[in-house]
Amino acid sequence: MKDIRACDAILVPVDFTDVSDYALNHATALAKIFNYRIYLLHVIGKRQKGTEKEKQAEESLIRIASRLNKDQGLKATHMVMDGNVFDTINRVANRLGASFIVMGVHGKKGIQHLVGSYPYKVACRAHVPVLVVKDKHRHVGFKNIVVPVDFSRRSAQKITQAIRFSKVFGARIRVFGFLSSENKAKIINKEALLKSVNDIFQKNNVPVTTDLIVNPNYDWPEALLVFGEQVNADLIMIVAERGGRIQEIFSTNKTERILDNTDVPVLTIVPCAEDLAAEAASSNKGLITPFVDPLGLIVKAGKVDNQYNNESD
C-alpha cells in the first residue's frame, strides 16, 4: 500500500445533512485503510462570516472531528471557509494536496435542476478525483468495480487507475463496452479493444470480466447504469465530462446523468491536460496516479473516429 500512497488527505464537504454523513461514512472507512487524515470542510456565504451561523458550524465540526479522533482513532481536522461552495471545495482540495474529495449527493430539487447538480459541479471543476456517494458503504473498500472503456485517451487513463484500485482493494474489474449500433465492423473493432484491455488486466494479475452491450434502444449512460445494477457494482469509475454554461442550464451531460441517477458510488477522474502534467510533476501523488497509455491503446488527440463519439464516456 505504501508504494501508491504519497498523500494522506481526504477532503469531506459537510453541510450537516444525511448525505454528508454518508460521505463521512465512506471517508472514515478509507481513512482507516490508508491511514489518511480527514479534513472536514463547511462552506458559508461571505455575508455569514462572523455570524452566529459560522459559530454554530464551527462547534458542530469540532464535535464531529472529536468523535472521529476519539471513537474511530483517526486524525481529523476541521475548517469553515466562506465563498462559492464549488470553487472553495476545489481550492481547499488543491491546497491540501488531497488524494480525493468524498461527497454525498442531494439530488435535484427546484432551481438546482436548472443550474446543474452539486456533485457534478464539483467533479467537473476538480483537479483531484471525486468520490460521489448516496448511501452508507455496504462493506469496507470496493470489491466489484465497473470500468467503461472506449477508444478515447480518457479510457486509457482509467485502465491505469483501475489496476491500482484492484491491487489495493482486492477488487474484480468489470470492463464495460457499449454500442448503440449493430454495425458488424464497429462490433468487431469494439470487441478487439475490449480484448486488449482485458489482456492488460490479466497481465497485471487483476481479476477481470469483459462485457459488450449492443442495444440501439439505449444511450451510453443508461446502458452503464443498467449494467452496474445487473452486476451489483460497488464502484463505477468514469472520467468527468466538462460542459459549457449553456449546457449546464438547459441540459445534462453524461457525467451529470450518471451521478444523479445511480445509487452506486462513482469515482470521477478529470482528464485535463494541465492536470495530467501537474500530476506527472508531483511524482505519483496520492492514490490516483499520472496518465499512462497501456500498450498504446489510445487514439491520438483529434483523431478519434466519429463512429465512436456516441459511445464515449
Image (spheres, rainbow, N blue to C red):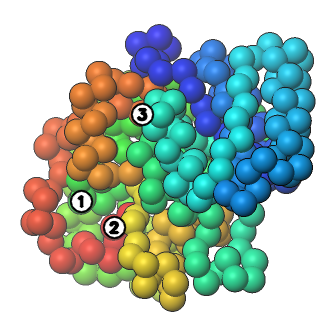
In terms of depth relative to the viewer, which is nearer, 110 or 83? 83
Residue positioned 89% across, 30% down in the render: 63
Residue annotated with mark 3: 288
In terms of depth relative to the viewer, which is nearer, 212 or 42? 42
Q: How many marks?
A: 3
Residue positioned 65% across, 80% down in the render: 113
Percent position (x, y) of residue 285? 38, 25
Q: Quick one: label 2 or label 1, which is nearer the N terminus?
A: 1
Q: Quick one: label 3 or label 2, which is nearer the N terminus?
A: 3
Against 298, is 128 above or below? above
Q: Amino acid at mark 3?
A: Ile
Percent position (x, y) of residue 68? 82, 23
User: Within 10 Å of the Cα at label 3, are there few (<14), some (14-19), or many (20+) other Cα atoms?
Assistant: many
What is the CA distance from the residue labelled 1 to the residue labelled 3? Answer: 21 Å
Task: Say what secondary structure mark 2 lies in.
Answer: loop
Residue annotated with mark 1: 151
Q: Amino acid at mark 2?
A: Ser
Against 115, is 192 above or below? above
Residue annotated with mark 2: 312
